[in-house]
Amino acid sequence: MKRKTLVISIGLIAIAWGAFIFSNGYNKEAKIASTQDIKQLVQDYSTRMKVADSASITSHKLTVSDEGEGTSTYDLPQDEFFVSIAPFVESTHPCEIHSLTGCQGEMADQEFEVNIVDDEGNTVLNQKMKTYGNGFVDLWLPRDKTYKVKISHDGKTANSEISTFEGDNTCITTMQLV
């Protein structure tokens, strides 16, 4: 009788543990209600309004890991591509997949002239932008295109070509101002 009680107890514990993992999950998938919600979430991590152990963004997914909450993965908008650019003068770091919680650029809280033209010659963006405290400026661009990017600051300029196809880099740390 004791053995049967022990087996039932172990079974109940296994079921309870499975329910806990399923509901609170170590790898929980989440859906964001709207494009605006996902953009706000990304901005909150970029500006450090929200904190997590890690938050990284690929060409199609935002992945947020927090010890107490597990890992959540969010799909990015199907028609927009996220890219974060860190202009620099002296130092940079090699990067392909942007870490919203880890990447740090040289030129934090600086204002830049940002000009972006698509491969058909259309101006997509032409405005002054300020880098966040992490030294990056975040952009949402139309997907599946190639762009010429020009960034200017204090008489120095950086030019680069970026693209927004599946698997392309979301972290641009190669734009040295000269």
Image (tube, helix red, strand yellow):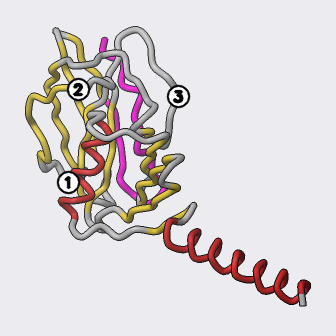
- Relative to residue 8, is residue 48 depicted above or below? above
Kindly give the residue lying farthest to the left in the view shown: 127
Q: Earlier in the sequence, mark 2 or mark 1?
A: 1
Q: Measure the alpha-carbon separation of dots 2 and 3.
A: 18 Å
Q: Residues within 10 Å of mark 2 (few under 14, many from 20)?
A: many
Q: Earlier in the sequence, mark 3 or mark 1?
A: 3
Rendering quarter of residue 73: bottom left
Q: Residues within 10 Å of mark 1 (few under 14, many from 20)?
A: few
Q: Amino acid at mark 1?
A: Glu
- Tell me what residue is drawn at x 64 percent, y 71 percent: 17
- Relative to residue 175, is residue 143 depicted above or below? below
- Tell me what residue is drawn at x 50 percent, y 23 percent: 93
Left or right: where 114 falls relative to 89: left
Q: Earlier in the sequence, mark 2 or mark 3?
A: 3
Q: Amino acid at mark 3?
A: Pro
Which residue position is annotated with label 1?
Answer: 120
The label number, if any, that marks residue 94 in the structure image: 3
Q: Measure the alpha-carbon separation of dots 2 and 1.
A: 27 Å
Left or right: where 173 falls relative to 48: right
Give the number of the mark in front: 2 or 1: 2
Q: Percent position (x, y) of residue 3?
A: 91, 85
Q: Amino acid at mark 2?
A: Thr
Q: Percent position (x, y) of residue 22?
A: 55, 74
* Residues shaded magenta: 160-178
- Tell me what residue is drawn at x 25 percent, y 33 percent: 137
